[in-house]
Amino acid sequence: MVSGPSLDEQAYVRGGETQTAVKILVVGHFAVGKTTFIGSISEISPLSTEETMTRAGEAIDDLKGVQGKTTTTVAMDFGRLTVSERVVLYLFGTPGQQRFVQMWEDMARGALGALVLVDPERLADSFAVIDLIEQYGLDYAIAVNHFDGSPLRDERALREALDLLDDTPVVVCDARDERSSAEALITLVRYLMDRAR
Amino acid sequence: MSDSDKQEHEAAELVRPYVITGGRHLPGEGQFSLITLVTAAADHQQRPARLSPEEQEVLRMCVGGYLSVAEIAGHMQLPVGVVKILLAALSEGGYLISRPPEQRAPVANLQILEEVLNGLRAKFG
């Protein structure tokens, strides 16, 4: 039996009858900080869902650390931010893996763009995500999630390693800090505006 | 929880989506996207008994205001595909109002991006 939670008023979209819903993807490999990033911006506690029919991975989703993360069945995390009386922004996060292709199609369709979170220590892990984003024709910016103590390569080396175009924005952020996360999103949105002009 | 309990639990979890949806297939592409906003139709506040418990649960959740399809799936802890099927059935029965995201001209897109930019600056600047 499904026992749905009773939701409080804040759970609902304010002014939903007139709001235009839009979305931006926050993508990156497992454990790069997507959920943290979304949580720092979102006005609701981040939610998660799965596209697959099995929920067997649920019990190990909470494992701390990178090793445990690689065995989860996945999911997508998402949050919401009402940016004006007319526009409500959804942030969707998911790892970049071909086996979640149905989910990617759902997420990518109609998205304004994507923010790719990368770990400077594990750049190679981001290749698959960037390939997928490009495959779906989404404009994107790179946000280097700068964990405490991890050395940041110079931007040039990072651009080379990720094979970025010259105009692709690269920004450093701390996903735990809401202003820092917002700054990374602002960089992406400004870039998307330039592309739309 | 013993191992056999656990196995039974997992088996139940695997079977459940098919039972919940009554074996129905996914609705046509485009009817419900992840960010389609959904709410209960005003004149259907009392829920007929012929709806399944899950359909009633979704409808009950939607009475409070607008939610996206993704949020309903998240709150219900059901896969998005299953929720889309439940929503399609409720929509067919006239219990729900849905507002799919519009296809926008590039100019409109630029205005929306500007609102997102201003909103982010106002909230976190």
Image: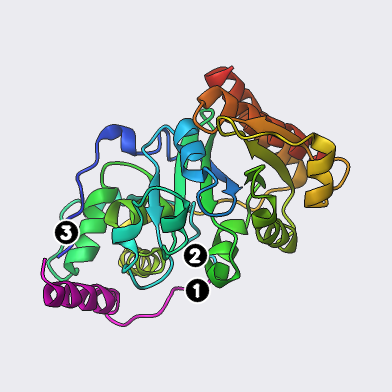
x then y, percent, for residue B120? 58, 26
Q: Nearer the viewer, residue A148 or A99?
A: A148
Judge the density around disc 2: few (<14), some (14-19), many (≥20) Cα neighbours within 10 Å.
Answer: few
Residue type, mark 2 in image:
Gln
Q: Which residues are magenta?
A: B1-29
What's the mark number on residue B28? 1
Q: Secondary structure at mark 2?
A: loop
Do the numbered discs 1 and 2 sit on residues whose CB atoms are within 8 Å? yes
Q: How far from the left and from the top, in percent, is residue A117?
A: 62, 44
| A134 on left or right of A182 | right
Mark 1: few/some/many CA within 10 Å (<14, 14-19, 20+): few
In reply to whether residue B96 is colored magenta, the answer given is no
Q: Chain of mark 1?
A: B
Q: Residue A59: x and y, percent? A: 28, 60
Q: Residues within 10 Å of mark 3 (few under 14, many from 20)?
A: few
Residue under pointer 2: B31
Query: Nearer the N terminus, badge 2 or badge 3?
Result: 2
* Predominant SS along the magenta part: helix
